[in-house]
Image: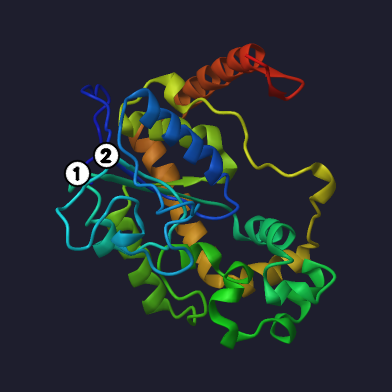
Amino acid sequence: MSFLGDKAEGPPITNVMFLKTHKTASSTVLNILFRFAETNNLSVALPVGSQFHLGYPWLFLARYVEGVEPSGPKQHFNIMCNHLRFNLPEVQKVMPKDTFYFSILRNPVFQLESSFVYYKDHTPAFRGVTSLEAFLASPWTYYNWSLGLSNIYARNNMWFDLGFDNNAPAEEGYVRASLAAVEQRFQLVLIAEHFDESMVLLRRLLRWRLDDVVSFSLNSRSRRTVTSLTPEGQERAQRWCALDWRLYQHFNRTFWAKVHAELGLQRLRAEVELLRVRRRELEALCLQDGGPKNQ
């Protein structure tokens, strides 16, 4: 991927595939993309019927998209961003060749903690345990490998979303090959802990306007439900989700390398401040006591 120069100009990129990972601030990104599609009258690859996901947790197939007929003419869309398990050959059947691919990752320790709260009642590995700390002290007591897709939220879920085996051994050759495959396909991987910086870099690479990437937080949890793992629990989470940990470490590095190549830290800070000022302006206009105003 050759990066846009400092004075990059041209029309905004409108063919975009966002791999929506779980518990990573991805719903906020989804909202940004839906808004951009509506504003610019773009087509969106939406799930068939009343589904929210594009076949998740099974590997994505083109037929999971509304309006795509296996035997019919090829149909391409501008935007794809609903939850799916990445499967490149099938994605390419519904997205143009010049599509910009990006995703978002979160520190796996915090991602797992959030998943434990959010999916506790739906994940067999989490149901019979009182806390994530207790689960991580003896994960194989609760985690049944044979339950397969039922337990995807309990281990290496971001790795799984990228189409890989979340129970694979974290062998060096396998991990490196997998990371290289992701890096080859995805022009950008955002980092949830640096969300505003991510939006600034995304906006630059897509050549979008500032207002296109302004957002309010979505799906954020009540502070009452947020608990902190002990340092020992955090280390156990890193070991338990070793594949996600390697994924996060690698793309945290590539994210900051892209920041330096595209913007530099001084310009990044200035543009982040512009984004935050604009967000505050729109919050005053659109929100009342943290919720939407009637208009």
Please tell me whether mark 2 sits on a helix, a strand or a loop.
Answer: loop
- Residue 98 numbered mark, or none: 1
Q: CA distance from mark 2 to mark 1?
A: 7 Å
Please tell me whether mark 1 sits on a helix, a strand or a loop.
Answer: loop
Q: Nearer the viewer, residue 227 or 129?
A: 129
Residue 128 in sight from this viewpoint: yes
Density class for disc 2 (Cα within 10 Å; few <14, some 14-19, many ≥20) is many
Q: From the viewer's perspective, is 197 left or right of 143?
A: left
Give amino acid for label 1. Asp
Q: Nearer the viewer, residue 7 or 196?
A: 196
* Coordinates of residue 262 in the picture (x, y in percent): 34, 33
Pointer 2 with pointer 1, Cβ within 8 A: yes
Residue lying at 58% horizontally and 20% vertically, measured from the top left: 279
Q: Nearer the viewer, residue 243 or 123?
A: 123
* Coordinates of residue 33 in the picture (x, y in percent): 42, 35
Position of 71 relative to 29 (above/below): below
Residue lying at 64% horizontally and 85% vertically, measured from the top left: 144
Q: How many labels were placed on the picture?
A: 2
Residue lying at 32% horizontally and 32% vertically, measured from the top left: 206
Q: From the viewer's perspective, is 256 left or right of 155?
A: left
Q: Which residue is denoted by mark 2 in the rendering?
A: 15
Where does the C terminus fall, quadrant-wise? top right
Give amino acid for label 2. Asn
Q: Earlier in the sequence, mark 2 or mark 1?
A: 2
* Coordinates of residue 105 in the picture (x, y in percent): 51, 52
Residue 263 in sight from this viewpoint: no
